[in-house]
Amino acid sequence: MKLGEIIKSYISEHDISVREFARKSNLSNTYISNIVNGSDKNPSLDVLGKIAKAMGLSSQQLFDCLDGEQAFAINQKAIQRIPLYTSISCGTGLFVDDQVEDYIAIPDKYIKPGRDYFANTASGDSMIGKGIKDGDVLVFEKTNIIENGEIGAFCVGESEAVCKTFRKLPSGIILLESANEAYQPIEVDLTDECFRVIGKYKFKFSIEQ
């Protein structure tokens, strides 16, 4: 669906006027009307955030509802480029420059100043229960600290980095859990010098809009 169609559906379901929705989203009545009738085909990502908030959604949740034809205007002065890695060396947990596949542009409002980020393409369906699909581009904040129940990027043994949910049991055992019953959790051997937390999952760019 286009953004205008989603707004129109929301207005109808909640029995409110375009003017009321415009007030909720802190945007002008004319501007919302233009989006609804298709006159404004390229709203900005800032507008997306305001509309999502008015609907009680996160920007990512609303973004995931849009189809691939919806375009957005981006303020080139308000974006940062972060590296998209093909793989990460699990023997050292290092990010190797020649493994950078591309760079992706992220609006400043979605990341925190002073933090480092990287992206990795999801492979397989092990995290499908968390809405992460094969081919999605996942954005992580670089860190070696992660809380129980959070999704992160981990180096385990000599294999490539994996995206899993971190779980520390009362016994002290650490499990890296999938979000698909077809996959067993990975039990971490804490004596394995190759185990590292390398990032905390922040958001994704979905292959399906």
Image: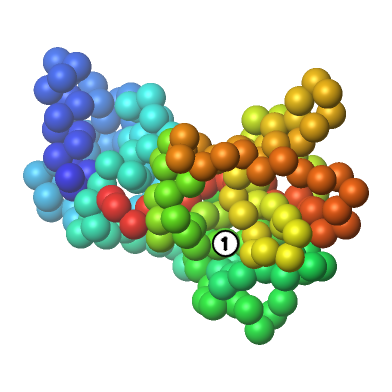
Above or below, 204 against 27 in this view is below
Q: Nearer the viewer, residue 82 or 193?
A: 193
What is the secondary structure assignment of the residue under circle 1? Answer: strand
Residue that sits furthest to the left in the current view: 37
Above or below, 7 against 152 in this view is above
Q: Position of residue 183 (x, y in %)?
A: 51, 42
| Residue 151 visible in the displayed image | no
Residue that sits furthest to the bottom in the current view: 98
Horizontal placement of 73 versus 125: left or right? left
Horizontal placement of 21 versus 101: left or right? left
Identify the residue at image location x=64%, y=64%: 160
Q: Quadrant of residue 13?
A: top left
Q: Quadrant of the N terminus?
A: top left
Identify the residue at image location x=72%, y=76%: 96
Q: Nearer the viewer, residue 159 or 197?
A: 159
> Mark 1 is on which residue type?
Ala
Mark 1 = which residue? 119
Identify the residue at image location x=56%, y=55%: 139
Q: Position of residue 85 (x, y in %)?
A: 59, 70
Above or below, 105 against 59 in this view is below
| Residue 126 visible in the displayed image | yes
Q: Position of residue 44 (x, y in %)?
A: 35, 53
Above or below, 2 against 26 in this view is below
